[in-house]
Image: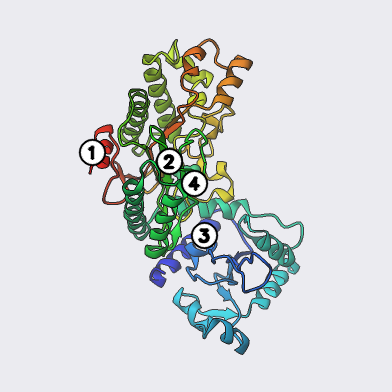
């Protein structure tokens, strides 16, 4: 946990934002509960706390709740102190009142009182604000307390997004730490990747590092020779000579801040000509995007500029042909990069997307495109200092997608399908770093950078 002043300041800022938006009533918070795999408490999955709870209260224990009163400014935390049976199974636990005090809240009560207090607010005709949640258990608890028809508060959601999008100094420190750990974890991949090794064997070594040096992984590691499948987890496949291997992985720190890096390596340590050509395009796109990230530009524009460069360079290879502006407008970029340039990152790897991708990633005056590629952009906002985003362009040759474009005429005469047939067995390439927007530009998070150029990667394999 951070110092209690951090949590107090965050809650004060939320209260102020809600009041400034003219809101009244109460804000109800729920932390997460344990989730069992087999229905008994001998089989719980590793506990993972709710991200908003981490942000505003910090207590990293299951079954906590809180209420903030928008009108009186009172705050109360709720959880049950353990009984003897709990002590037998779980050991002694810090008393609830003491833990609440750590987070700067002086009032506490048993969990049953949270339901009663929310119900009383509803009964008194007061508005109950709460955040969207993807945890079914919390949905059920919210419905039990606030009523079946209660819906998440858009005002509260927007206020929380407004705060969490702009990272504080203490968060940037944590993100740097996570970046350093992510770097070391990726080095394990680099050091163990060779023909004959198994994808899941390398992923397991990485996970061992993540669990012994941090909370664990920030998401299930993508480590695959089929990089054209965007989210392909490591499987029990042996790495073969001559393949490209996409390694997309991150660490979650003990304070629950994350990293998310991607590198693509030639399994034999040396790129073939064809692999190098495509790799260089992706790297040029990644570097150009990084050079353009600064306050004032929208990430939508950086995405579009990236796609523009990608198509220009693919044109030089003869894979597309025609006016590049027109190609960008027609969405030809989506054939090669069917995802966006990046996403927000922080406590969650796709930060806060459970609140709605558009609310998190789009300014009120921006509308999300429908097109493949641009429409998949998760972060389009005008950049401001404190934003933390990923810069992760990729080029993928997805036979089914190419065939669809061909059959449905979606290439509008720009795509050289005949040349693309030679790439059906190519796979995909993605390069990703985590970026902090600073007052005068941007910097990468973490103090080291994974090898990125062709020369750096081939040199790393020779060591
Ligand atoms: N690293 C996984 C993703 O960004 O979707
Ligand atoms: Mn990512």
Q: Eyeballing the image, is 205 above or below 277?
A: below
Marks 4 and 2 sit apart, C-alpha to C-alpha, by: 11 Å
- The tag earlier along the polypeptide, 4 or 2, is 4
Mark 2 neighbour density, 10 Å: few (under 14) some (14–19) many (20 or more): many
User: What is the tally of numbered marks visible in this picture?
Assistant: 4
Q: Position of residue 88 (x, y in %)?
A: 58, 87
Marks 1 and 4 sit apart, C-alpha to C-alpha, by: 25 Å
Q: Which residue is mark 2?
A: 239
Marks 3 and 2 sit apart, C-alpha to C-alpha, by: 36 Å
Q: Position of residue 125 (x, y in %)?
A: 73, 64
Mark 4 neighbour density, 10 Å: few (under 14) some (14–19) many (20 or more): many
Occupied quadrant, residue 122: bottom right
Q: Eyeballing the image, is 378 above or below 55?
A: above
Between disc 3 and disc 4, the foreground one is: 4
Q: Which residue is mark 1?
A: 459
* SS for callout 1: helix
* SS for callout 4: loop
Q: Which residue is mark 3?
A: 51
Tell me: 184 left or right of 123: left
């Amino acid at each position: 946990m951070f110092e209690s002043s951090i949590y107090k300041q965050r809650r004060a800022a939320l209260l102020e934002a809600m009041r400034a938006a003219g809101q009244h009533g109460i804000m109800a918070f729920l932390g997460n509960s344990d989730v069992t795999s087999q229905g008994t408490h001998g089989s719980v999955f590793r506990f993972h706390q709710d991200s908003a709870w981490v942000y505003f209260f910090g207590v990293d224990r299951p079954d906590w709740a809180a209420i903030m009163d928008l009108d009186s400014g009172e705050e109360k935390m709720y959880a049950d102190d353990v009984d003897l049976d709990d002590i037998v199974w779980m050991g002694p636990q810090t008393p609830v009142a003491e833990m609440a005090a750590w987070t700067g809240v002086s009032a506490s009560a048993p969990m049953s009182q949270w339901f009663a207090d929310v119900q009383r607010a509803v009964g008194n005709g007061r508005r109950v604000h709460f955040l969207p949640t993807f945890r079914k258990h919390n949905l059920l608890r919210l419905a039990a307390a606030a009523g079946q028809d209660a819906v998440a508060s858009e005002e509260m959601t927007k206020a929380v997004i407004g705060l969490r999008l702009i990272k504080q100094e203490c968060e940037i420190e944590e993100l740097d730490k996570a970046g350093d750990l992510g770097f070391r974890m990726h080095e394990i991949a680099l050091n163990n990747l060779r023909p004959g090794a198994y994808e899941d064997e390398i992923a397991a070594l990485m996970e061992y590092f993540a669990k012994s040096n941090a909370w664990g992984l920030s998401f299930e590691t993508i480590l695959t020779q089929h990089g054209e499948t965007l989210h392909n987890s490591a499987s029990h496949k042996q790495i073969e000579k001559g393949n490209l291997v996409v390694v997309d992985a991150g660490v979650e720190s003990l304070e629950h801040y994350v990293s998310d890096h991607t590198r693509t390596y030639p399994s034999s340590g040396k790129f073939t000509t064809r692999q190098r050509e495509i790799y260089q395009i992706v790297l040029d796109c990644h570097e150009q995007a990084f050079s353009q990230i600064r306050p004032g530009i929208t990430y939508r524009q950086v995405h579009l500029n990236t796609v523009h460069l990608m198509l220009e360079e693919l044109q030089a290879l003869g894979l597309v042909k025609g006016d590049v502006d027109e190609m960008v407008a027609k969405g030809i970029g989506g054939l090669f990069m069917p995802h966006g340039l990046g996403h927000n990152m922080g406590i969650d790897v796709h930060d806060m997307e459970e609140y709605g991708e558009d609310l998190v990633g789009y300014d009120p005056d921006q509308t999300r495109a429908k097109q493949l590629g641009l429409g998949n952009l998760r972060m389009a906002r005008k950049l401001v200092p404190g934003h933390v985003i990923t810069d992760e362009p990729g080029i993928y040759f997805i036979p089914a997608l190419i065939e669809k474009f061909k059959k449905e005429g979606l290439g509008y005469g720009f795509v050289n399908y005949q040349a693309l047939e030679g790439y059906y067995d190519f796979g995909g390439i993605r390069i990703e770093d985590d970026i902090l927007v600073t007052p005068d530009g941007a910097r990468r998070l973490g103090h080291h950078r994974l090898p990125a150029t062709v020369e750096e990667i081939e040199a790393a394999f020779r060591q």
